[in-house]
């Protein structure tokens, strides 16, 4: 059985507050210096993480990095 894990998604650019509302399960931090947005949060499994990636792609955002923390 899968246990929830912490995930991190780094997206290119400063994502607007309006778009961030589409990721209620994640916490966002915009890094103006590197022009990226870091989304983090605990997800139930890899399928939930893939759902986040699908949302990122469907919004036309560029995923720079994806990481799972044990």
Image (cartoon, helix red, strand yellow):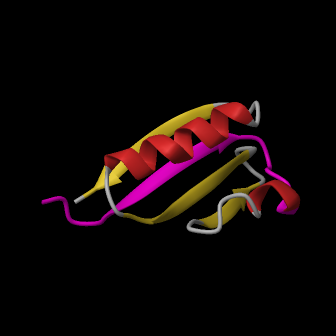
Q: Residue at x 75, y 50 (%)?
A: 33
Left or right of 35? Residue 51 is: left
Q: Is residue 16 magenta?
A: yes
Who is closer to the viewer here, 55 or 33? 55
Who is closer to the viewer here, 36 or 69? 69
Q: Residue furthest left?
A: 1
| Image location of residue 5, percent across then percent down | 30, 63
Question: What is the count of numbered marks?
Answer: 0
Which segment is the magenta one?
1-17
Residue 39 higher or lower than 34, as above or below: below
| Image location of residue 8, percent across then percent down | 46, 53
| Image quadrant in which you'd find residue 10 | top right
Left or right of 43? Residue 13 is: right
| Image location of residue 67, percent across then percent down | 38, 46
| Image quadrant in which you'd find residue 31 | bottom right
Who is closer to the viewer here, 11 or 47? 47
Who is closer to the viewer here, 33 or 56? 56
Q: Residue at x 41, y 56 (%)?
A: 7
Quadrant that contains the C terminus:
bottom left
Q: Is residue 39 magenta?
A: no
Q: Residue at x 70, y 45 (%)?
A: 34
| Image location of residue 41, percent across then percent down | 47, 66
Q: Residue at x 54, y 39 (%)?
A: 53
Residue 53 higher or lower than 20, as above or below: above
Left or right of 47? Residue 18 is: right
Quadrant that contains the N terminus:
bottom left
């Amino acid at each position: 059985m899968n246990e929830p894990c912490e995930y991190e998604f780094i997206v290119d650019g400063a994502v607007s507050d309006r778009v961030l509302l589409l990721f209620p399960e994640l916490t966002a931090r915009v890094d103006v210096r590197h022009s990226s947005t870091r989304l983090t949060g605990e997800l139930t499994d890899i399928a939930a993480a893939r759902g986040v990636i699908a949302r990122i792609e469907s919004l036309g955002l560029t995923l720079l990095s994806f990481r799972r923390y044990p």
